[in-house]
Image: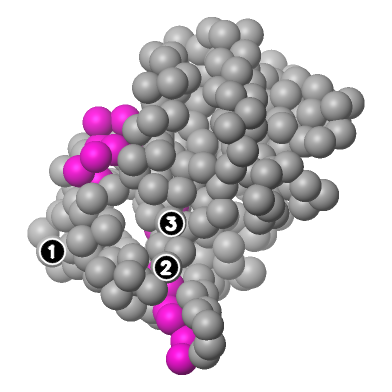
């Protein structure tokens, strides 16, 4: 297992970046360099990562390729292609995005997100991004969300079938799909279903936690790993079955110290369970 997360402290070159990575004890990272960086800068970070056994696990796109604004959608699709090309150049495990939303907020919840014609648009847009880049060393993946597809293991499997591209893989965020009381209360079973169904396609994982508050009608809130109700003793074994080079990222934290705490929690649990952490 490889564990990583965000880097909140600034860095100006690969040597300073490596110092930050080692402070956090990461063995996998998000891309440390942008797609428009010089060849020399990219090579410096790639060489540094290789020499120190650090896996570049993800290149984030985080743009809305199905925006209602046609010009914005075109620009975002172009950006997604640039990010996928960067992931391929760096040899990253994957480029990750969400499918996007049919409303003003790029990751918002809208009824139109589930329209049949929007599903077709998602399939066609994802194919276009992959086909235009034709990656050889990476995969384009879509992070599950509570209010857009894929929002379940089965809806992700359907996307895999319908997109029908070898370079399309799975980014697993099981926490994002815990969007009902039943999935919360039966989280062990739900998370195991995620791994059983999607395991062969998983390229990267986001690791978070959740709590459900006693409030009407229902409030499920994301928290740091170890601060919620998810069974990480079980989760680390499910991750371990995927192989030692699957990157696991903690996210949505505010400080260097929080990232250290969250990643250390998962590492400690894994080691106690007899799992090798690189």
SS assignment at label 2: loop
SS assignment at label 1: loop
Which residue sits furthest left? 274
Residue marked by disc 2: 180
Is-magenta flag for residue 264?
no
Please say if 238 is above or below 179. above
Task: Name the residue rendered at 57%, 9% in the picture.
Answer: 131
Q: How far apart are labels 3 and 2 at the CA level?
A: 8 Å
Task: Name the residue rendered at 58%, 42% in the picture.
Answer: 114
Which residue sits furthest front? 116
Please say if 183 is above or below 90. below
Q: Nearer the viewer, residue 156 or 267?
A: 156
Circle 1 packing at 10 Å, graded few (<14), some (14-19), many (20+), is few
Residue marked by disc 3: 177
Whether residue 7 sits left or right of residue 52 in the image: it is: right
Whole-percent x and y of residue 4?
Answer: 44, 51
Task: Name the residue rendered at 43%, 14% in the picture.
Answer: 165
Residue marked by disc 1: 273
Q: Is residue 71 visible?
A: yes
Stretch in magenta: 195-214
Please say if 258 is above or below 252. below
Q: Nearer the viewer, mark 1 or mark 2?
A: 2
């Amino acid at each position: 297992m490889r564990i990583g997360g965000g880097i909140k402290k600034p860095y100006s070159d690969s040597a300073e970046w490596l110092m930050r990575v080692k402070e956090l004890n990461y063995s996998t990272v998000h891309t440390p360099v942008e797609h428009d960086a010089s060849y020399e800068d990219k090579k410096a970070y790639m060489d540094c990562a290789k020499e120190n056994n650090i896996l570049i696990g993800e290149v984030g796109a985080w743009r809305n390729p199905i925006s209602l604004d046609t010009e914005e959608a075109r620009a975002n699709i172009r950006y997604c292609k640039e990010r996928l090309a960067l992931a391929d150049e760096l040899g990253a495990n994957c480029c990750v995005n969400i499918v996007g939303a049919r409303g003003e907020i790029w990751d918002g919840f809208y009824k139109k997100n589930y329209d049949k014609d929007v599903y077709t648009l998602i399939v066609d847009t994802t194919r276009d991004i992959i086909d235009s880049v034709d990656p050889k060393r990476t995969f384009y993946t879509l992070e599950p969300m509570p209010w857009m597809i894929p929002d379940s293991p089965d809806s992700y499997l359907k996307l895999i079938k319908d997109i029908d591209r070898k370079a399309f893989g799975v980014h697993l965020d099981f926490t994002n799909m815990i969007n009902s009381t039943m999935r919360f209360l039966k989280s062990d079973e739900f998370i195991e279903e995620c791994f059983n169904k999607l395991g062969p396609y998983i390229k990267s994982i986001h690791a978070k936690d959740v709590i459900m508050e006693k409030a009407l009608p229902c409030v499920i809130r994301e928290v740091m790993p170890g601060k919620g109700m998810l069974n990480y003793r079980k989760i680390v074994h499910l991750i371990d079955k995927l192989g030692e080079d699957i990157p696991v990222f903690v996210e949505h934290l505010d400080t260097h110290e929080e990232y250290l705490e969250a990643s250390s929690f998962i590492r400690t649990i894994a080691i106690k369970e007899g799992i090798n952490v690189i």
